[in-house]
Amino acid sequence: MKKTVAIDGPAGAGKSTIAKLVAEKLGYIYIDTGAMYRAVAWKVLDTGAGTTDEAIIRTAEKLHVSLRFVGDNVRVFADDTDVTEKIRTPEVTALVSQVAQLGPVREKMVELQRGMAKDGGVVMDGRDIASNVLPNADVKIFLTASIEERALRRWKEMKAKGYEEPIENLAAEIEARDKADSERAISPLVRVPEATLLDTTGMTIDEVVAKVMELCG
Ligand code: DC
């Protein structure tokens, strides 16, 4: 039977790296829900219509976000623009928590996410997957790591993309986003009691993948 696997956790915990590798091993589809909120944030900045809550909601209402397969890779589209790389800039990262706390934006994205998971065979990562999007997921994992380790991982990721940001700034940005994501009123980041807690501090990618595969049984 094809399962649904929900992976939640704070920023920089390694969710997307792990979820992608696990999906590949299982022959499942990987769904990056954070990328969907990022696509909305990108569109808001691209249209230049301002970043008030009202302007963001209006932009999200008109926007079609989709994840499409191009060869073996999942690409993120905002309408017909491939934004896969564009959504990883510091500007998008700075805006995305505000976008993700808005009820109408979340409702639209959650509906899309549930539709993509309806036949199973998906590994979905985000903040509210086990608690809200897929409460009946077969496997629920809460992935985390120390703030120092998460900041270091983000630093390496950014450096590889040509961004030189002091590590202290990244740690502060991650902490601010964790706070915003955990304290928002609608579908905050929470660990549901039935989720397996996996602290990846000091673990290699291979070790984490092996552990998650074991949990997927
Ligand atoms: O995982 P990420 O950094 O790409 O996520 C971007 C933002 O979107 C993050 O600040 C929290 C938010 N998000 C959310 O609220 N719900 C999700 N299911 C996924 C991400």
Image: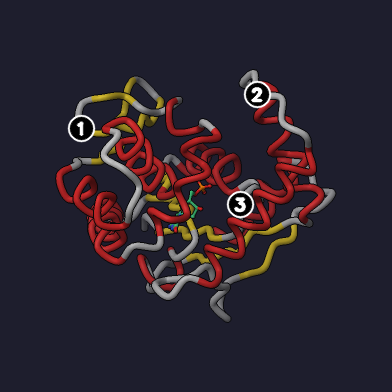
Quarter containing the N terminus = bottom left
Numbered label attached to residue 163: 2
Q: Residue at x 36, y 50 (%)?
A: 121
Nearest the viewer among 171 and 29 is: 171
Instruction: Decide which of tag 3 and tag 1 comes sooner along the chain.
Output: 3
**Disc 3 element:** loop
Instruction: Look at 38% across and 53% down and name the residue there.
Output: 99
Q: Which mark is residue 79?
A: 1
Task: Specify the amino acid type for callout 1.
Answer: Asp
Are there few (<14), some (14-19), or many (20+) residues within 10 Å of tag 1? some
Is 1 in front, or is 72? Answer: 72
Give residue 145's position: percent from left, percent from top: 74, 56
In the foreground, 116 or 4: 116
Q: CA distance from mark 1 to mark 2?
A: 27 Å
- Name the image quarter holding residue 178: bottom right
Query: Does dot 2 land on a helix, a strand or a loop?
Result: loop
The residue that appears at 54% across and 63% down in the rendered structure is 180
Q: Nearer the viewer, mark 1 or mark 2?
A: 2
Q: Which residue is mark 3?
A: 11
- Mark 3 or 2: in front is 2
Label whose residue precedes the other's in the sequence (1 or 2): 1
Give the residue type that dot 3 points to: Ala
Q: Are marks 1 and 2 in contact (CB under 8 Å)?
A: no
Measured as percent of width and height from the top left, residue 44 is found at 31, 40
Relative horizontal placement of residue 207, taking residue 71 as reference (left or right): right
Q: Is residue 189 above or below residue 70?
A: below
Q: Seen from this angle, which residue lies furthest right?
A: 202
